[in-house]
């Protein structure tokens, strides 16, 4: 087996090693800080965070509150996921006996179906009755499908509603667990239910914006930086946003161009401060985009001004055909991690259930460079990449050794989960 | 590697397979029942339970609230132990930053020291500052010892007291975690502290009795049996107790003899009910005994009446020289599990932290038979024996397949932990 840890090819690993060393030296403080934060704000039910490791900086670039990809975690972490689910479900509904899992509608994505089967199995093994309720209108009776990859079977059942409760067959669950990011809005059948829905539907991509999340993240990074004595920029990507942009209609282009220009200048200033000679770049993303849709890289304001029709169409596409409006312009964080024989560009993805880091994997793309979005054609996963679930550093290893590198991933991913927790709390208060 | 699961050599595996099948079929009910029980009664901080698997019966025979042997768990379960510790410590002291671990005094037991080092490391990796405070009077300054087996180092620090608080060096912990069963009583330095002490000191072997524990267990087994529809005897060893017995002084011998006689008759009646043709036997144990001391097997009342001086001396010995008074006479549960090339007699030992099963191992003794105490000279451990931590059944396997056999172990072990939880609660109320 190849080494599960990518070789750091950058010459600029100094500051990251410094960051990692600081995180390790302060691990007990950091854990106590997280504990105190989780007492104030309940963690998300589950989440996954895409990280980018630039050598000089380690930062989240996307936080998913309806994570797919549980099938890509190391099977050795199964028991960990089960324990964490027991905590997570007990937090929502201490007396729960049954869970209705509502997945995405794309039953033709064989990888996604593996994720559903894995989640189903984890919840079942955690000691709950679980059924899969589908929102696909064509499925009007219980339908068993056999998964192409693993051969596992899934029973998709149509959801029925009676007053304030939904059921499948004779099963009326205590809680409904969404693994559907609601890109096309809240389904009528789930509106105003008496049952608990987790995560809250207001966090679906029909309503959530990336800039809101990264606004909360900015505050979290600042508090964390003050607490452990680091420049928050080392874990926080700068960003700006344009509310009214519409690529298809060519609206808001000036807003975008001026924000790209300002952000590139801000990044350059931080690079100068740290003596980093790389070329700054920004990533422009749809406010509500998922699956890597509507993402582009810009190295200069001209990259935006000179967008051709093809690029505009790409930027205005989104999942389930939603028309994108609003964009976040985020500091591009190089990824200096490379993995495998083809030295594919790699970024870590860290999974959490409740406050617990339960594992992760590398997203790889040998067709993409260090400055590009990897969630694109050519993408593959390295499910066994993380030997340890990123929860605990080993004081007897060096800062760049496996358990310790992974610990740094787990710290930064949990900062993003904390930002999401505050986002959820604010949403619940109607802010 | 040899198979991690012992071969069931008994012909009487029918009823156990039936028990296991019932536990599997009702897993969701069982888990919901445990969850409702843990909402009523907090689980012990940690515990380990010795089980005996007779083929027709699976029952706990000892529940340890100060478990050693964490070094014998599968290292793959480390992350599981860490997560469970985070839950367990948060339950006791949500704002805890530091833990003082107080181990047993026997620093010459190289195996026990490995357990201390493993516990230390687990607590540290769970994100807490941890120091080891020793009660050994001869250690008057911080003393580093190097472990003979693993080469790990441990710093033993003398405990100092200032008003209601204990410290080691400049470290004053929020909580004190006992891994010392207090066989010789509560140390004066730990009396009436303002800090939390876990587990409660009233559960030390200076005060706890086995018959009290198995009294609580009897109730738990009865409720559980009613809930899932099984005869509680299938998971509960019958017992009787003699309060005033003193082997050295030959006091209470008649009480013992009559109780042995009655218990053997009761066992015979159950054997007849199930058509079991094995010879009934009882185990006589010191009420407060640990480390397998003061344990004997009796197959008839004559075995007790004809005890010679050597046997009396054995029965009156106990850890740290405590004089035994009081004995429990427990239904002997054959162990039909055998492991290894020498087909050593084996019994499972299951470990729990908070409500979570975190693993286990087999205690083996090739010099002992199916009706004898295995915690005796010749004992060894099979640390890697459990591939899964006993938490979750796999509905796709047969009842006797590994994850499912282990699930049954985990269920019965948790019943014992629940009995201990009620014992702790009663102790806290001063009952």
Image (cartoon, coloured by chain):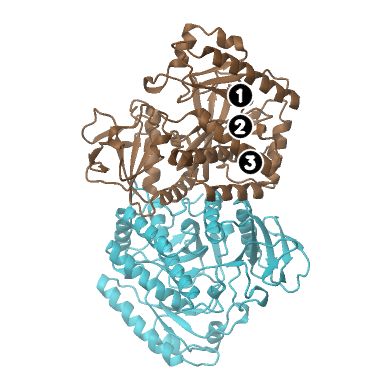
Chain colours: A cyan, B brown
Q: Which mark is residue B331?
A: 1
* Residue at the image point whose x is 64% and y is 69% from the top: A104
Pointer 2 residue? B59
* Residue at the image point whose x is 72% and y is 36% from the top: B18
Q: Is the same chain shared between marks 3 and 1?
A: yes
Residue B253: x and y in percent read 52, 12
Report if residue B401 is visible in the image. Answer: yes
Residue A296 lies left or right of residue B224; in this view the side is left
Whether the residues at callouts 1 and 2 have beta carbons within 8 Å, the answer is yes
Q: Nearer the viewer, mark 3 or mark 1?
A: 3
Residue B370 lies left or right of residue B290; in this view the side is right
In the image shown, does B68 or B259 lie closer to the viewer? B259
Crowding near the residue tagged with mark 1, few <14, some 14–19, many ≥20 C-alpha atoms within 10 Å? many
User: What is the spatial separation of the Cα atoms under label 1 and label 2, in whole angstroms?
Assistant: 10 Å
Residue A119: x and y in percent read 61, 58
Pointer 3 residue? B223
């Amino acid at each position: 087996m190849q080494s599960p840890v990518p070789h750091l090819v950058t010459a600029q690993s100094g500051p990251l090693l410094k960051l990692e060393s600081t995180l390790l030296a302060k691990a007990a403080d950091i854990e106590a800080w997280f504990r105190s934060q989780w007492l104030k704000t309940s963690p998300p039910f589950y989440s996954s965070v895409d990280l980018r490791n630039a050598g000089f900086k380690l930062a989240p670039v996307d936080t998913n509150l309806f994570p797919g990809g549980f099938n890509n975690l190391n099977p050795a972490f199964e028991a960990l996921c089960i324990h964490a689910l027991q905590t997570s479900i007990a937090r929502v509904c201490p007396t729960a006996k049954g869970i209705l899992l509502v997945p995405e509608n794309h039953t033709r994505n064989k990888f996604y179906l593996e994720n559903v089967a894995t989640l189903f199995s984890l919840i079942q093994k955690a000691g709950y009755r679980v059924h899969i309720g589908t929102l696909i209108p064509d499925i009007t009776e219980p339908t068993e499908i056999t998964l192409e990859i693993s051969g596992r079977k899934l029973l998709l059942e149509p959801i029925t509603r009676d007053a304030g409760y939904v059921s499948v067959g004779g099963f009326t669950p205590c809680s409904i667990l969404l693994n559907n990011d609601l890109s096309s809005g809240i389904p009528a059948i789930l509106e105003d239910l008496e049952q608990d829905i987790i995560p809250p539907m207001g966090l679906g991509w029909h309503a959530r914006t990336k800039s809101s999340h990264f606004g909360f993240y900015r505050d979290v990074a600042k508090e964390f930086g003050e607490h452990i004595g680091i420049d928050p920029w080392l874990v926080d990507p700068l960003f700006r946003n344009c509310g009214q942009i519409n690529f298809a209609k060519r609206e808001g282009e000036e807003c975008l161009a001026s924000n790209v220009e300002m952000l590139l200048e801000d990044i350059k200033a931080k690079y100068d401060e740290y003596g980093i000679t790389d070329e700054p770049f920004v990533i422009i993303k749809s406010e509500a985009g998922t699956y890597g849709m509507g993402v582009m890289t810009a190295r200069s304001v001209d990259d935006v001004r000179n967008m051709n029709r093809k690029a505009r169409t790409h930027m205005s596409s989104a999942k389930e055909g939603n028309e994108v409006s609003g964009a976040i312009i985020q500091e591009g964080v190089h990824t200096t991690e490379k993995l495998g024989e083809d030295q594919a560009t790699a970024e870590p993805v860290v999974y959490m259930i409740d406050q617990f880091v339960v594992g992760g994997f590398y997203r790889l793309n040998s067709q993409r460079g260090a400055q590009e979005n990897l969630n694109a054609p050519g993408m593959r996963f390295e499910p066994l990449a993380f030997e340890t679930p990123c929860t605990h550093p080993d004081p007897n290893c060096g800062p760049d050794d496996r358990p310790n590198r992974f610990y740094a991933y787990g710290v930064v991913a949990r900062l993003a989960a904390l930002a999401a927790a505050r986002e959820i709390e604010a949403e619940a208060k109607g802010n």
